[in-house]
Amino acid sequence: MPRFNANAIETLSRLIPLLSIILTAVLSLAPFLSGLSSGNPGEPVGVTEERMRTDLLTGIQYQRGFAGPELDLERHAAAQTWAERNAASGSEENSPEDIAMVQAHLPSNEADAGAFLGLWMGSQPHAAVLLDPDNTRVGIGVASNNGITYAVVQFTRE
């Protein structure tokens, strides 16, 4: 009969509670995590918008050859507030702040990062804002209301 090293058994016995906690966490989060990856229309409120914010940031960085811009959390919060304002009012207006900004709205069933980037990159003034290397810090907001999704990208300079 094989003999086990006492240190190995002791290590395993200490790992069992930790592994139990990890397994419990994974099983608890599984429904949420599956919603994140599936594009499921029944996913939790805000997940679609957060995914779109992330995809827009990646798309802008791709358009710039991954040479910025850097995410600014304060600007991110301000852009989200502006997107929510747009969604609540059903309009897009210029910001009173001294910032560079692009914004657009699309029917929610057509709205994704690629669609918004396509709109902006197809417009020379919008593309100029997105690609301006002096716009070094960015915040992105996405909000939906009444079947319309609004996206806002705000830039500041360092």
Image (cartoon, rainbow, N blue to C red):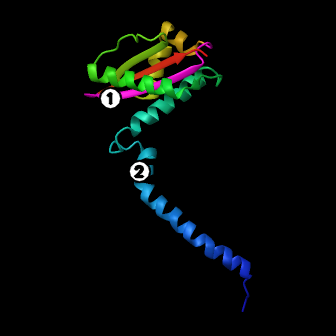
Name the element at disc 1.
strand
Which residue appears at 54% of the width and 9% of the height?
128
Q: Amino acid at mark 1?
A: Ser
Q: Which residue carries the number 1 mark?
A: 144
Q: Nearer the viewer, residue 61 or 100?
A: 100
Amino acid at dot 2? Phe
Task: Give left or right: position of 86 versus 51.
Answer: left
Q: Please state, as top left, top right, bottom left or bottom right, where the N terminus lies in the image.
A: bottom right
Q: Is residue 9 above or below residue 26?
A: below
Q: In the displayed orientation, state which residue is furthest to the top.
A: 125
As drawn, which residue projects farthest toward the left? 146
Residue 46's place in the image compared with 156, above or below, is below
Counting from the top left corner in percent of width and height, residue 9 is at: 67, 79
Position in image of residue 61 (x %, y %) = 59, 24
Mark 2 vs mark 1, CA separation in Å? 21 Å
- What residue lies at 59% left-to-right and 22% top-to-bottom? 69
In this picture, residue 80 sits left or right of residue 19: left
- Hey, which residue is sitting farthest bottom in the picture? 1
- Residue at 49% of width from left, 23% of height from top? 75
Disc 2 crowd, CA 10 A, few/some/many (<14, 14-19, 20+): few
Q: Main secondary structure of the magenta part?
A: strand
**Relative to 55, is 85 on the left or the right?**
left
Query: Is residue 42 located in the magenta-colored stretch of the structure?
Result: no
The region drawn magenta spans 133-147
Residue 145's x, y, as percent?
28, 28
Q: Earlier in the sequence, mark 2 or mark 1?
A: 2
| The image quarter in which residue 15 lies | bottom right
Which quarter of the rendering shows the C terminus? top right
- Residue 91, numbered label: none
Question: Disc 2, disc 1: CB below 8 Å?
Answer: no
Badge number at residue 32: 2
Q: Quadrant of residue 111?
A: top left
